[in-house]
Image (cartoon, rainbow, N blue to C red):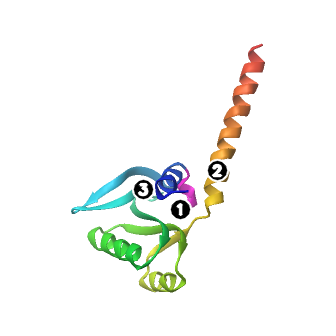
Amino acid sequence: MSEAELKYGLINYSDLIEPGLTFKGREVNLYGKRCDLLFVDKDGKDLYVEVKKHVDPNGGGQLMLYSGLVSNSSALVAFSIMDIFIHGVHRAGYEYVEIKEEDIYYRFFSSKIKEGAERIISETSRS
């Protein structure tokens, strides 16, 4: 799965990041820098999300930059995050989420199977 597919999955299944999120925008401009995704949490606060397939210190630097530019929360979402980086992120009070590729695939295919079943039921009930 590419980083672009991960972003698409997170937009559609944002509860993998945090329950109650509503998608607000992508490639959000923050004082000339671009943050990957923007959500609103259940309390109405913006959550800026930086998405990476695998997090190295560069991804962490972006997270720290974004959190310095906005007064709201920022989070880092990836398939894998270096252990040493997790420790630093946790100590600094930043949010991070490791996502499993299969969680996104499962959600996608489950919804497609459900849509197909509903279509078949609808078509057979009309007959």
Q: Which mark is residue 72?
A: none
User: In the image, residue 61 lies at what x, y percent?
Assistant: 35, 76
- Residue placed most toward the observer, 83 or 93: 83
| Residue type at numbered disc 2 | Arg
Q: Provide residue 23's location: percent of width, then percent of height.
A: 44, 50
Residue drawn where x is 62% and y is 64% of the image = 100
Residue 82 painted magenta = no
Which image quadrant for residue 47? Answer: bottom left
Q: Which residue is mark 2?
A: 107
Left or right of 15 in this view: 69: left
Which residue corresponds to mark 1? 17
The residue that disc 3 covers is 39
Q: Residue at x 40, y 76 (%)?
A: 60
For image coordinates 33% across by 72% down, the residue present is 67
As drawn, 112 above or below 106:
above
- 122 above or below 3? above
Dot 1, crowdedness within 10 Å: few (<14), some or many (≥20)?
A: some
Residue type, mark 1 in image = Ile
The x and y percentages for residue 38 are 39, 56
- Residue 10 in percent (x, y) is at 51, 55
Q: Contact (CB < 8 A) between labels 3 and 1?
A: yes
Query: How many marks on residues?
Result: 3
Query: Can you tell which of label 2 and label 1 is closer to the viewer?
Result: 2
Real-space Cα distance between discs 3 and 1? 10 Å
Q: Amino acid at mark 3?
A: Phe
Circles 2, 3 touching at the beta carbon (< 8 Å): no
Q: Residues within 10 Å of mark 3 (few under 14, many from 20)?
A: many
Q: Residues within 10 Å of mark 2 (few under 14, many from 20)?
A: some
| Mark 2: secondary structure | helix
Residue numbers of the magenta segment? 13-19
Give the vertical position of 46 relative to 94 (above or below): above
For marks 2 and 3, the one nearer the N-term is 3
